[in-house]
Amino acid sequence: MAQSPETTTKTHSLPLPTTITSRGVAATELRPWGSFTVLEEGRGYKIKRIEVKPGHRLSLQMHHHRSEHWIVVSGTARVVCGDKEILLSNNQSTYVPQCTAHRLENPGVISLVLIEVQNGEYLGEDDIIRYQDDYARTSN
Protein backbone atom coordinates (compact mmCIF):
# COMPACT_ATOMS: atom_id res chain seq x y z
CA MET A 1 0.00 0.00 0.00
CA ALA A 2 1.42 3.37 -1.03
CA GLN A 3 1.70 6.06 1.60
CA SER A 4 1.20 9.71 0.99
CA PRO A 5 4.27 11.96 1.38
CA GLU A 6 2.64 13.54 4.43
CA THR A 7 2.74 10.31 6.42
CA THR A 8 6.36 9.45 5.55
CA THR A 9 7.92 12.84 6.35
CA LYS A 10 10.21 12.69 9.40
CA THR A 11 11.62 15.51 11.39
CA HIS A 12 15.36 15.16 12.02
CA SER A 13 16.92 16.98 14.89
CA LEU A 14 20.58 16.72 15.75
CA PRO A 15 21.62 17.09 19.37
CA LEU A 16 23.98 19.98 20.01
CA PRO A 17 27.39 19.13 21.42
CA THR A 18 27.64 20.01 25.10
CA THR A 19 30.25 22.68 24.31
CA ILE A 20 27.67 24.67 22.31
CA THR A 21 24.67 24.42 24.61
CA SER A 22 23.98 27.33 26.93
CA ARG A 23 25.60 27.28 30.35
CA GLY A 24 24.30 30.59 31.63
CA VAL A 25 26.10 33.89 31.89
CA ALA A 26 29.90 33.70 31.89
CA ALA A 27 31.57 34.95 35.08
CA THR A 28 34.21 37.66 34.94
CA GLU A 29 37.23 37.37 37.22
CA LEU A 30 38.90 40.58 38.37
CA ARG A 31 42.69 40.88 38.55
CA PRO A 32 44.94 43.80 39.59
CA TRP A 33 45.73 44.42 35.88
CA GLY A 34 42.13 44.17 34.62
CA SER A 35 39.82 41.18 34.12
CA PHE A 36 39.06 38.07 32.11
CA THR A 37 35.88 36.24 31.16
CA VAL A 38 35.77 32.61 30.03
CA LEU A 39 33.52 32.64 26.96
CA GLU A 40 33.66 28.94 26.14
CA GLU A 41 35.52 25.85 27.26
CA GLY A 42 35.68 22.35 25.85
CA ARG A 43 38.02 19.40 25.75
CA GLY A 44 41.46 20.74 24.88
CA TYR A 45 40.52 24.42 24.48
CA LYS A 46 39.34 27.51 26.36
CA ILE A 47 38.34 30.91 24.94
CA LYS A 48 38.69 34.04 27.09
CA ARG A 49 38.00 37.74 26.69
CA ILE A 50 40.82 39.61 28.43
CA GLU A 51 40.79 43.29 29.32
CA VAL A 52 43.99 45.02 30.47
CA LYS A 53 43.81 48.49 32.04
CA PRO A 54 45.93 51.27 30.50
CA GLY A 55 49.50 51.19 31.83
CA HIS A 56 49.14 47.70 33.35
CA ARG A 57 50.66 44.35 32.46
CA LEU A 58 50.35 40.69 33.34
CA SER A 59 53.19 38.77 34.93
CA LEU A 60 56.10 37.43 32.91
CA GLN A 61 54.93 33.82 32.91
CA MET A 62 55.03 30.39 31.31
CA HIS A 63 52.63 27.45 31.02
CA HIS A 64 53.70 23.79 30.91
CA HIS A 65 50.46 22.43 29.48
CA ARG A 66 49.04 24.97 27.05
CA SER A 67 49.74 27.29 24.15
CA GLU A 68 47.84 30.54 23.55
CA HIS A 69 46.66 32.58 20.55
CA TRP A 70 45.94 36.28 21.21
CA ILE A 71 43.79 38.41 18.89
CA VAL A 72 43.55 42.14 19.64
CA VAL A 73 40.00 43.52 19.52
CA SER A 74 40.78 47.08 20.64
CA GLY A 75 43.70 49.02 22.07
CA THR A 76 47.40 48.29 21.78
CA ALA A 77 49.23 45.24 23.12
CA ARG A 78 52.94 45.03 23.87
CA VAL A 79 53.81 41.33 23.79
CA VAL A 80 56.98 39.70 25.03
CA CYS A 81 57.27 36.12 23.79
CA GLY A 82 60.58 34.39 24.40
CA ASP A 83 63.30 36.86 23.38
CA LYS A 84 61.01 38.86 21.03
CA GLU A 85 58.91 41.96 21.74
CA ILE A 86 56.15 43.14 19.39
CA LEU A 87 53.34 45.72 19.33
CA LEU A 88 49.89 44.64 18.15
CA SER A 89 46.77 46.68 17.36
CA ASN A 90 43.20 45.96 16.20
CA ASN A 91 42.77 42.70 14.29
CA GLN A 92 46.40 41.62 14.74
CA SER A 93 47.35 38.42 16.50
CA THR A 94 50.22 36.37 17.87
CA TYR A 95 50.93 32.83 19.03
CA VAL A 96 52.52 31.90 22.37
CA PRO A 97 53.96 28.35 22.28
CA GLN A 98 53.76 26.05 25.27
CA CYS A 99 56.71 26.35 27.71
CA THR A 100 57.64 29.85 26.43
CA ALA A 101 58.06 32.84 28.77
CA HIS A 102 55.61 35.58 27.79
CA ARG A 103 54.03 38.82 28.99
CA LEU A 104 51.10 40.96 27.87
CA GLU A 105 51.10 44.72 28.50
CA ASN A 106 48.84 47.67 27.69
CA PRO A 107 51.11 50.65 26.89
CA GLY A 108 48.17 52.73 25.66
CA VAL A 109 45.65 55.13 27.19
CA ILE A 110 42.51 53.05 26.47
CA SER A 111 41.68 49.55 27.66
CA LEU A 112 43.26 46.67 25.75
CA VAL A 113 40.70 44.02 24.84
CA LEU A 114 41.75 40.73 23.31
CA ILE A 115 40.48 37.24 22.72
CA GLU A 116 42.70 34.44 23.98
CA VAL A 117 42.36 30.90 22.68
CA GLN A 118 44.14 28.34 24.84
CA ASN A 119 44.96 24.85 23.55
CA GLY A 120 46.30 21.98 25.61
CA GLU A 121 45.59 18.92 27.70
CA TYR A 122 45.29 20.95 30.94
CA LEU A 123 43.94 24.51 31.05
CA GLY A 124 43.70 25.26 34.77
CA GLU A 125 44.64 28.66 36.19
CA ASP A 126 47.25 26.95 38.38
CA ASP A 127 49.39 26.13 35.31
CA ILE A 128 51.20 29.46 35.61
CA ILE A 129 54.87 29.81 36.46
CA ARG A 130 55.48 33.50 37.25
CA TYR A 131 58.99 34.90 36.80
CA GLN A 132 58.22 38.60 37.38
CA ASP A 133 55.04 40.23 38.62
CA ASP A 134 54.09 43.84 39.37
CA TYR A 135 51.62 42.62 42.00
CA ALA A 136 53.94 40.36 44.09
CA ARG A 137 52.46 37.08 42.81
CA THR A 138 55.70 35.41 41.68
CA SER A 139 56.13 31.66 42.14
CA ASN A 140 58.40 30.46 44.93
Image: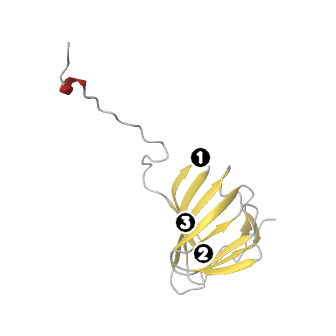
Q: Which residue is mark 1?
A: 43
Dot 1 or dot 2: first in sequence order is: 2
Amino acid under disc 2: Trp
Residue 75 in the image: above or below residue 51? below
The percent position of residue 52, horizontal first and vertical second, equals: 56, 75
Counting from the top left corner in percent of width and height, residue 110 is at: 50, 83
User: Where 95 falls versus 15 (above or below)?
Assistant: below
Q: Amino acid at mark 1?
A: Arg
The secondary element bearing badge 1 is classed as loop
Give the alpha-carbon distance from disc 3 to disc 1, as whole Å. 20 Å
* Disc 3 residue type (three-letter): Phe
Mark pair 2, 3: CA separation: 10 Å
* Residue appearing at x 39%, y 37% in the figure: 14
Colouring convention used in this rendered image of the protein: secondary structure
* Residue 87: % across, % down: 62, 81
Residue 103 x/y as whole percent: 69, 73
Disc ID at residue 33: 2
Left or right placement of residue 105 versus residue 10 in this view: right
Question: In the image, what residue occupies the spot 25% across and 28% down?
Answer: 9
- In the rendered image, the residue lying farthest to the top is 1
Separation of disc 1 and disc 2 at Cα?
28 Å
> Where is mark 3, residue-wise?
36
